[in-house]
Amino acid sequence: MTQKSSDIFEAFKTLNVLVVGDVMIDRYVKGEVERISPEAPVPVVHLQQREDRLGGAANVALNLRALGATPYLCSIIGQDRDAAQLLELLPQNGLSVKGLLQSSKRITTVKTRILAGSQQLLRVDEEITDDLDATDTQRFVAAIGNMLDEREIHAILFQDYNKGVLTPEVIRGILLYALKRDIPTAVDPKFRNFWAYKHVTLFKPNLKEIRNQMPEPVLPEQASLQRAANYVRQQLGNQYTLITLSEKGLFVEENGQSLIVGTRPRQIADVSGAGDTVISVATLGMAIGLPMPETAVLANLAGGQVCERLGVVPVNKVQLQAEYEQLQQDERV
């Protein structure tokens, strides 16, 4: 690692990033369990607290903002009570609502987690996962085109949760905008439309996702992952492939050169949202021209950090910079 961490984080402050994808509310219902229900063999949760947090692509935007960049969040939500709550949460967290469109044909995605102490007992998902219809697709792509005309965007980040916003038509339209304007792009894909991101700059699946799409088994070993990255490039024409490997760290590849960045020992509390953090850091690193091995190290540290905290939370920039500087010092010894 050669670049000073202070220079990297100062450069992040200059970036405007368009975040496109599925936004949602992560709702936490917390309480205590002291008995089993007489109606069924299930715990009775005595409610003590409710909390709503920004999730999905909105959590990516929070991570970008926490790192110093300026995110512009773009999505389609419903016209329901949860949409109103989401539109209140965004400015409360320093995010603009201008890139969000509402549709009477959608509902706002909510993931409700029921917790007893730090133990998650149940999750309830409220969502529509059907693709946007032709009308919503057209106005959404047009709105993003207008946004790109109005302001300078340094990177476009697709955050796909398969909730129906990132359809093949939407993906194709935005990637065409990016190619015409020479804007680098990054995607955190899901199972549907995995191969729709033609000519994306940075492609970041996790190990499970890549295994489900490959014609041969994929092992968390460099040679096997390199073959997977070669296959991805044949399908997409992307420049960088980054594959998260859970407790084994992450794999990064560029032009046939690859490495695996291992994890540091941590007390894992919750892995939710770690992928959001990794793609956020990786996109910023790509946008400032940080060498991909350094980008991967920084992204790996950030993803590990958020796993130490319960629930979906953004990265802590001060802690991340301190850990990165310590790692640089350790390598110089």
Image (cartoon, rainbow, N blue to C red):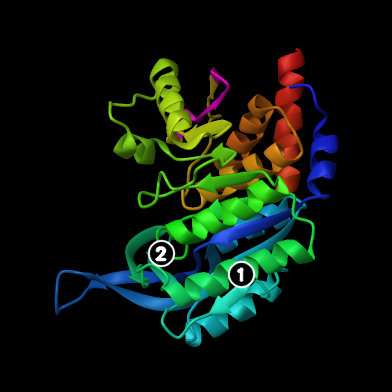
The reply, left or right, for residue 246 in relation to residue 301 is: left
Report which quarter residue 30 is drawn in: bottom left
Give the residue type that dot 2 points to: Lys
- Within 10 Å of disc 2 (Cα), the crowding (few <14, some 14-19, many 20+) is many
Q: Residue at x 65, y 28 (%)?
A: 292
Q: Residue at x 32, y 63 (%)?
A: 121
Q: First in sequence: mark 1 or mark 2?
A: 1
Relative depth, front residue between 240 and 223:
240
Query: Which segment did they paint magenta?
Result: 247-258
Task: State the image coordinates of residue 12 (x, y, percent, origin top left).
Answer: 78, 46
Is residue 66 among what the camera can see? yes
Question: Circle 2 sits on which residue?
Answer: 163
Report which quarter residue 9 is drawn in: top right
Question: Circle 1 sits on which residue?
Answer: 142
The reply, left or right, for residue 104 in relation to residue 289 is: left
**In the picture shown, does residue 314 fall above or below 31?**
above
Relative depth, front residue between 232 and 43:
232
**In the picture shown, does residue 64 fall above or below 254?**
below
Is residue 310 among what the camera can see? no
The reply, left or right, for residue 264 in relation to residue 271 is: right
Where disc 1 sits, the SS reads helix
Task: State the image coordinates of residue 314 (x, y, percent, origin top left).
Answer: 62, 54
**Residue 253 shown in magenta:** yes
Q: Quadrant of the C terminus?
A: top right
C-alpha distance separating marks 1 and 2: 20 Å
Q: Quadrant of the N terminus?
A: top right
- Within 10 Å of disc 1 (Cα), the crowding (few <14, some 14-19, many 20+) is some
Q: Residue at x 57, y 77 (%)?
A: 101
Q: Residue furthest top?
A: 333
Label placed on residue 30: none
Task: State the image coordinates of residue 242 (x, y, percent, origin top left).
Answer: 52, 33
